[in-house]
Image (tube, rainbow, N blue to C red):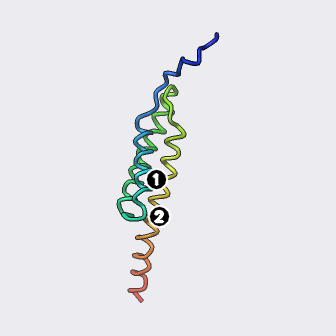
Amino acid sequence: MHTSPLQTRTHATDGTAIIAALLAAGSLFVLSFLPLLSGFLGALALAAALVSRRRLRAEPALRGAGLSLAAFMVGAFAAVMTVAAYGVPLLVGQLFSLA
Protein backbone atom coordinates (compact mmCIF):
# COMPACT_ATOMS: atom_id res chain seq x y z
CA MET A 1 0.00 0.00 0.00
CA HIS A 2 1.36 3.36 -1.03
CA THR A 3 0.76 6.30 1.26
CA SER A 4 0.76 9.93 0.34
CA PRO A 5 3.16 12.33 2.10
CA LEU A 6 0.12 14.30 3.25
CA GLN A 7 -1.20 11.42 5.33
CA THR A 8 -0.13 11.62 8.94
CA ARG A 9 -0.24 9.23 11.83
CA THR A 10 -3.21 9.51 14.09
CA HIS A 11 -1.50 8.26 17.24
CA ALA A 12 -1.94 10.68 20.09
CA THR A 13 0.79 11.75 22.47
CA ASP A 14 0.13 10.99 26.12
CA GLY A 15 -0.98 14.18 27.86
CA THR A 16 0.70 13.19 31.10
CA ALA A 17 4.03 12.94 29.27
CA ILE A 18 3.56 16.49 27.99
CA ILE A 19 2.71 17.75 31.48
CA ALA A 20 5.74 15.94 32.92
CA ALA A 21 8.00 17.53 30.30
CA LEU A 22 6.61 21.01 31.02
CA LEU A 23 7.11 20.52 34.76
CA ALA A 24 10.66 19.30 34.18
CA ALA A 25 11.45 22.26 31.93
CA GLY A 26 10.02 24.61 34.55
CA SER A 27 12.13 23.01 37.25
CA LEU A 28 15.28 23.58 35.19
CA PHE A 29 14.28 27.16 34.43
CA VAL A 30 13.88 28.15 38.10
CA LEU A 31 16.77 26.05 39.43
CA SER A 32 19.20 28.95 39.72
CA PHE A 33 16.96 31.51 41.41
CA LEU A 34 14.26 29.48 43.23
CA PRO A 35 15.83 26.14 44.09
CA LEU A 36 13.10 25.02 46.51
CA LEU A 37 10.45 25.57 43.85
CA SER A 38 12.68 23.74 41.41
CA GLY A 39 12.84 20.72 43.70
CA PHE A 40 9.07 20.74 44.09
CA LEU A 41 8.53 20.98 40.33
CA GLY A 42 11.14 18.27 39.81
CA ALA A 43 9.32 15.95 42.20
CA LEU A 44 6.03 16.64 40.40
CA ALA A 45 7.74 15.93 37.07
CA LEU A 46 9.03 12.62 38.46
CA ALA A 47 5.55 11.59 39.58
CA ALA A 48 3.92 12.64 36.30
CA ALA A 49 6.61 10.83 34.29
CA LEU A 50 6.05 7.61 36.25
CA VAL A 51 2.28 7.84 35.69
CA SER A 52 2.91 8.50 32.01
CA ARG A 53 5.26 5.51 31.67
CA ARG A 54 2.61 3.27 33.23
CA ARG A 55 -0.07 4.57 30.83
CA LEU A 56 2.23 4.17 27.83
CA ARG A 57 2.88 0.54 28.71
CA ALA A 58 -0.86 -0.10 29.14
CA GLU A 59 -1.85 1.64 25.88
CA PRO A 60 0.67 0.88 23.10
CA ALA A 61 -1.10 3.22 20.65
CA LEU A 62 -0.05 6.27 22.69
CA ARG A 63 3.19 8.08 21.91
CA GLY A 64 5.52 9.97 24.25
CA ALA A 65 7.84 7.39 25.79
CA GLY A 66 10.94 9.47 25.06
CA LEU A 67 9.27 12.60 26.35
CA SER A 68 8.36 10.97 29.65
CA LEU A 69 11.85 9.48 30.01
CA ALA A 70 13.46 12.89 29.46
CA ALA A 71 11.04 14.45 31.96
CA PHE A 72 11.95 11.77 34.50
CA MET A 73 15.68 12.40 34.12
CA VAL A 74 15.42 16.20 34.25
CA GLY A 75 13.03 16.06 37.21
CA ALA A 76 15.40 13.74 39.07
CA PHE A 77 18.29 16.10 38.35
CA ALA A 78 16.38 19.09 39.74
CA ALA A 79 15.32 17.16 42.84
CA VAL A 80 18.88 15.95 43.51
CA MET A 81 20.29 19.46 43.05
CA THR A 82 17.77 20.83 45.54
CA VAL A 83 18.66 18.18 48.10
CA ALA A 84 22.35 18.88 47.53
CA ALA A 85 21.83 22.62 47.93
CA TYR A 86 19.68 22.46 51.07
CA GLY A 87 19.79 18.99 52.57
CA VAL A 88 23.53 18.49 52.79
CA PRO A 89 24.31 21.85 54.48
CA LEU A 90 21.50 21.28 56.99
CA LEU A 91 22.78 17.79 57.77
CA VAL A 92 26.37 18.99 58.16
CA GLY A 93 25.22 21.86 60.37
CA GLN A 94 23.35 19.44 62.61
CA LEU A 95 26.35 17.13 62.85
CA PHE A 96 28.72 19.92 63.86
CA SER A 97 26.27 21.38 66.38
CA LEU A 98 26.30 18.06 68.25
CA ALA A 99 30.06 18.16 68.74
Mark 1 neighbour class, 10 Å CA radius: few under 14, some 14 to 19, many 20 or more: many
Is disc 2 placed on a helix, strand or loop? helix
Question: In the image, residue 53 lies at what x, y percent?
Answer: 49, 39
Q: Quadrant of the C terminus?
A: bottom left
Question: In the image, residue 37 lies at what x, y percent?
Answer: 35, 59
Q: Could you tell me which residue is drawn at 44 percent across and 50 percent down?
A: 25
In front of the other: 49 or 1: 1
Residue 36, image quadrant: bottom left
Image height of 77 relative to 7, above or below: below
Query: Residue extending furthest front?
Result: 6
In front of the other: 6 or 9: 6
Q: Could you tell me which residue is drawn at 41 percent across and 35 percent down?
A: 15
Q: Quadrant of the N terminus?
A: top right
Residue 93, image quadrant: bottom left
In front of the other: 30 or 79: 30
Query: Residue extending furthest bottom?
Result: 99
Structural distance between the alpha carbons of marks 2 and 1? 10 Å
Image height of 43 relative to 58, above or below: below
In the picture, measured across the screen, residue 65 lies left or right of residue 90, that is: right
Question: In the image, residue 54 lies at what x, y percent?
Answer: 47, 37
Amino acid marked by disc 2: Met
What number is the disc on residue 81? 2
Q: Could you tell me which residue is drawn at 49 percent across and 42 percent down?
A: 68
Which residue, given by chain and number where applicable, does mark 1 sit on?
75
Amino acid marked by disc 1: Gly
Image height of 76 relative to 8, above or below: below
